[in-house]
Image: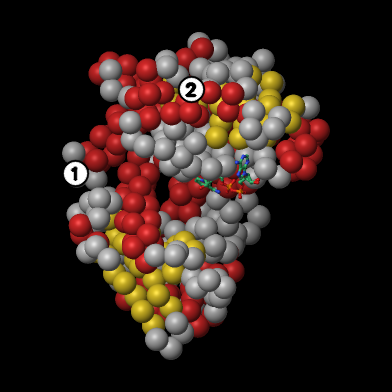
Amino acid sequence: MTAFWAEPDYDAHELVQVVHDRASGLTAIIAVHSTHCGPSAGGTRFWHYNDPAAAMRDCLRLSRGMSYKNAMAGLPMGGGKAVILADEQRIKTPEMLAAFGDAVEALGGRYVTAEDVGITEADMVAVAQRTAHVSGLPVAGEGSAGGDPGPFTAYGIYLGIKAAVRHKLGKDSLAGVHVAVQGTGSVGGGVARLVARDGANLMLADINADRAAALAAELGAVAVSTDAIMATPCDVFSPNALGAILDDAGIAALDCAIVAGGANNQLAKPQHGAVLAARGILYAPDYVINAGGIISVATEYLARREGRNVDVAEVNALVEKIPGRLESIWQESEASGVSADVVADRMAQKLIGRG
Ligand code: NAD
């Protein structure tokens, strides 16, 4: 295995810790990329990797991504991430979660954890028995923010789509605008409902065809096949399922003016941002437009540290700043001729003191 600091994804991370707890069988990696803006925040992924080097790469890449995302969201938080290496049976025990909580606690607040793939709210409640540096805990009461970040992510994407339509098409309303949504889960379903409420002409696709069909019936939308959604003629293509869909073939297939959706890591390779721009397609950088969830999670954490609950209106007010950030990226991109994804990366690097 290559030393982690020789990995291409190692980017002068402040701390990379491998946690091993013999009694529970826990093996985890915690990577703190940057605490320049505040305590590093990012979820814990529970995943089976065939190769531990792949787990290290994932953790390094994702923690750097969180530095960029949190900085661009205007949060007083840095970027970090944890990966728990699951065995083939993906056995997760209370003892493992307790040992993981102890490891987070030992970092004294330099890393704040939350849910990611394979980790539930109940798991975070278990981790919270051992450390205060946890977020994404159950909602405290009526009108309080917290819990599932999906609706806040969807709200930010909806606002980002409206900003893109205004910027690219000169329209102040989504009425009659054709929007194609890939993935109708927590985020995509929320986006679909919000744009439909504004009168958009909606097309939906999901590998869970029943889910897409039910939502289409509810919203008066058209369900299309997952193979066809990227090539569907539309104004806005909104990817809310998988990453790495914007590769050479995917971009060539697009028949849209705007790509604006919540899926993480949409560009298959860094150069695909420029390929999109060369086609004249306006791109909303994924980690800027999909920051609503982390805004909710981080605000919940910071409020709890102050001994208060945070309400939905307070989180929404922060999510409502996403369109302004996108607009400044697009303006800078047009002024400089540099693609929007690179402009966003440069802005983020400056914010974390690495510009
Ligand atoms: P989810 O599991 O609730 O929904 C994903 C949906 O995509 C599912 O309905 C699934 O069937 C569908 N899907 C999978 N492969 C597909 C394909 N090839 N074509 C069409 N549909 C497909 O997940 P989610 O929470 O809605 O997250 C969606 C994306 O947004 C992910 O990339 C996630 O990393 C990203 N994201 C989510 C949040 C959040 O707050 N949940 C925040 C930031 C980013």
Q: Amino acid at mark 1?
A: Arg
The Cα–Cα distance between marks 1 and 2, rounded to whole angstroms, is 34 Å
Residue 354, label in figure: 1
Identify the secondary structure beneath mark 2.
helix
Name the residue at 56% across, 31% down.
238
Name the residue at 42% across, 15% down.
280
User: Can you tell which quarter of the image residue 329 is in?
Assistant: top left
Where does the image place residue 150, in percent across and percent down from the top left?
58, 47
User: Can you tell which quarter of the image residue 321 is in?
Assistant: top left
Which is more toward the observer, 249 or 213? Answer: 249
User: Can you tell which quarter of the image residue 184 is in?
Assistant: top right
Q: Is residue 169 above or below residue 295?
A: above
Q: Is residue 95 above or below residue 180?
A: below
Q: How many neighbours does mark 2 have within 10 angstroms: few (below 14), some (14-19), or many (20 or more)?
A: some
Where does the image place residue 71, in percent across and percent down from the top left?
32, 44
* Visible residue check, residue 319: no
Judge left or right: residue 171 versus residue 50: right
